[in-house]
Amino acid sequence: MASHTLEVGLRGTRNYVQGSQILARTAEIVARDHPGAVLASAKFTRITLLGVELVLGEGDAPSGGEEIGRGQLLAGDERLPVRWFEVPGPEAPRIEDVPGATSGLAPDGAGGGRADFAIAGSFESYLAAVIECVKALHAHRGERVSDIWFTALVGARLPVAPTYPTAGSLAVDLKIERMVEGRLQTLSVVETTGAGAPPAYQICFSCIIGD
């Protein structure tokens, strides 16, 4: 088991560390020894405004911080489990926000839709664009929507190396939604177009629907 304190922060006015940051810093660390690895899945069970510790492999959890999520990367036939924990102590540092990466958002009226993107072609910029798109589609639902969170990736094969298209489009197809303890949980399929686009995968979000 190996652990790393991730360089994450509270971007802009957010009061939480973004999942895209956590996954991007994890990908950078994994890529040092496994440049051909892909992110297969990730699930976050809570948000945090503290620092984040990455634990690679199985084994005992670090003392102190609570687990906030876990995931799995694949390097050839090797499975690389990862877990993320809060780092007890002060809040993560405040960092500068970044401009949006999507345009032409077109909701389909059924919880999905599409948007174009223009990014740097890195793992982080791609993932941030996807989350931005799906979050915006949730916000455009007919009901009053708030507290929208990215919670999971399923069935993915997202390369940790910077091999993503710098421009293209995203199509989001809502497949499942259900209420769980007062929050709407959704599962959508994301399809990406553009040179070198990854295969389709599932993404999960959670939000509150107003009365």
Image (spheres, rainbow, N blue to C red):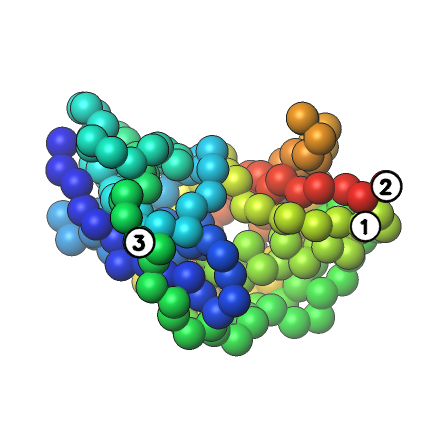
Contact between marks 3 and 2 (CB within 8 A): the answer is no
Q: Which SS class for mark 3?
A: strand
Q: Which is nearer the eye, 96 or 43? A: 96
Q: Residues within 10 Å of mark 2 (few under 14, many from 20)?
A: few
The quarter holding residue 28 reads: bottom left
Q: Which numbered disc, 1 or 3, marks the residue closer to the eye? A: 3
Mark 3–mark 2 Cα distance, whole angstroms, equals 36 Å
The image position of residue 139, as x and y in percent, is: 73, 55
Mark 1–mark 3 Cα distance, whole angstroms, equals 34 Å
The image position of residue 45, as x and y in percent, is: 47, 33
**Outermost residue, front direction?**
90
Asked if residue 117 lies left or right of residue 127, the reply is right
Q: Residues within 10 Å of mark 1 (few under 14, many from 20)?
A: few
Q: Which is nearer the eye, 104 or 59? A: 59
The correct choice, above or below, for 91 with respect to 85 in the image is below
Image disc number at residue 144: 1
Image disc number at residue 211: 2
Image disc number at residue 74: none
The quarter holding residue 124 reads: bottom left
Asked if residue 32 lies left or right of residue 140, the reply is left
The C terminus lies in quadrant:
top right
Please name the residue shown 76% across and 62% down the image: 106
The quarter holding residue 25 reads: bottom left
The image position of residue 89, as x and y in percent, is: 28, 48
Q: Residues within 10 Å of mark 3 (few under 14, many from 20)?
A: few
Q: Which SS class for mark 2?
A: loop
Contact between marks 1 and 2 (CB within 8 A): the answer is yes
Q: Which SS class for mark 1?
A: loop
Asked whether residue 160 is in view, the answer is no
